[in-house]
Image (cartoon, rainbow, N blue to C red):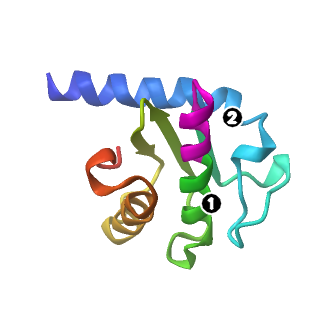
Amino acid sequence: MRNAIAFGVAAFAAALALPALAQEESTYDHAGARAHADDHMVHGAALNAADQDLANRIAAEISRDKAVHNTPVTVAVKDGNVTLSGPTDNRQTVTHIEDDAAKVAGRSHVAPMV
């Protein structure tokens, strides 16, 4: 059951990330400035304006963190709840990403990174 939930959350995050790839305002470089379409490392995705704003602020916070430099991350937000995903197995990097998101959204609104 837990694997099915994790797969569902990952699939949802991936589906939300596709439109974000085309939205430059959702992606920031590691200095916190807007990145060009070819330079995406952190993506934010949501279905409404409030969630998109939260995703953008979290993406900016993660992008400023030098400890996660060059780590692709997708930030999906639905109803104020944050799901993070990306291809890293480094626990220290995952902790930094989760902590960055929690600074913006609050710890209780951030699911563990998948």
- The image quadrant that residue 102 belongs to is bottom left
Residue situated furthest bottom in the rendering: 66
Looking at the image, residue 17 lies above or below residue 88:
above
Instruction: Give 68 or 78, whichever is nearer the viewer.
Output: 78
Q: Which of marks 2 and 1 is nearer the N terminus?
A: 2
- Measuring 66% from the left and 55% from the top, which residue is drawn there? 41
Which residue type carries mark 2? Ala
18 falls in the magenta region: no
Who's the residue at 77% across and 65% down the image? 33
| Left or right: 57 in relation to 76 | right
Q: Which quarter of the rendered picture does the N terminus lie within? A: top left
Q: Name the residue under label 1.
A: 60
Residue carrying label 2: 20
Q: Where residue 51 sits in the image (x, y, percent)?
A: 54, 35
Q: Residue 20 placed where, x, y %? A: 68, 34
The mark found on residue 110 in the picture is none
Give the total number of marks visible in the rendering: 2
**Which corner quadrant of the image does residue 88 belong to?**
bottom left
The residue carrying pointer 2 sits among few (fewer than 14), some (14 to 19) or many (20 or more) residues within 10 Å by Cα, namely: many
In-image side of 31 versus 48 (left or right): right
Q: Is residue 79 left or right of residue 21?
A: left
Is residue 52 part of the magenta span, yes or no? yes
Looking at the image, residue 46 lies above or below residue 64: above
Q: What residue type is labelled 1?
A: Ala
Q: Considering the numbered disc 1 on the image, is that residue within a helix, a strand or a loop?
A: helix
Furthest residue toward front: 50
Which of the 4 image quarters holds residue 111?
top left
Which residues fall within the magenta stretch?
Answer: 46-55
Instruction: Say which residue appears at 72% left-offset and 51% top-offset.
Output: 40
Q: Which of 15 and 79 is in front in this view?
A: 79
